[in-house]
Image (cartoon, rainbow, N blue to C red):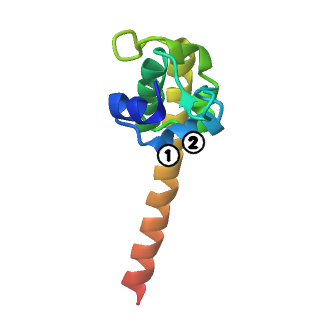
């Protein structure tokens, strides 16, 4: 299938699909006329990539989950590597929240002083 059909079937924009390919998350073949051609498995792969990115993982994180991208992560979400990355990302988010909360308190104190 061509990039437009894959975009339509997955809800991803063609630009996103090209980005996924550039990052090594998605592969295509080139037809004789130069068009990208994707296999049927690309639909599941793109859906998984989008799910992982929407969950808060980065494209670098998703690259580490290549083996999980072939699974149906909606129906079978237990990919051990994904769980570990979710936990790491959650910890990083909590640390950022703590830092921002401390900054918020300092700003509030400074405003109260003024």
CB-based contact (under 8 Å), mark 1 and mark 2:
yes
Assign the C terminus to one quadrant of the image. bottom left
Q: Secondary structure at mark 1?
A: helix
Q: Which residue is mark 1?
A: 15
Give x and y (percent) for residue 94: 48, 43
Q: Which residue is mark 2?
A: 19
Q: Identify the residue shown where x is 49% and y is 46%.
A: 15
Q: Identify the residue shown where x is 59% and y is 14%.
A: 67
**Nearer to us in this view, 99 or 80:** 80
Give x and y (percent) for residue 101: 44, 58
Residue 2 in view (yes/no): yes
Q: Is residue 114 above or below residue 80?
A: below
Q: Is residue 75 left or right of residue 92?
A: left
Q: Is residue 105 left or right of residue 18?
A: left
Q: Is residue 81 above or below residue 56?
A: above
Quarter assignment of residue 50: top left
**Nearer to us in this view, 80 or 110:** 80
Residue 94 in view (yes/no): no
Label disc, if present, on residue 111 of the rendered structure: none
Q: What crowding class fits label 1: few (fewer than 14 Cα within 10 Å), some (14-19), or many (20 or more)?
A: few
Residue ranking furthest to the front: 33
Q: Identify the residue shown where x is 54% and y is 26%.
A: 37
Q: Secondary structure at mark 2?
A: helix
Q: CA distance from mark 1 to mark 2?
A: 6 Å
């Amino acid at each position: 299938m061509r990039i437009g059909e894959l975009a339509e079937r997955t809800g991803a924009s063609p630009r996103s699909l090209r980005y996924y390919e550039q990052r090594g998350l998605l592969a295509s073949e080139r037809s004789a006329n130069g068009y990208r051609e994707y296999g049927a498995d690309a639909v599941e792969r793109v859906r998984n990539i989008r799910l992982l990115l929407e969950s808060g993982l980065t494209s670098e994180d998703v690259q580490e989950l290549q083996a999980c991208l072939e699974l149906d992560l909606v129906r079978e979400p237990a990919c051990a590597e994904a769980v570990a990355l979710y936990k790491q990302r959650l910890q990083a988010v909590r640390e950022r929240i703590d830092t921002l909360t401390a900054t918020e308190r300092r700003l509030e104190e400074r405003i109260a002083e003024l």
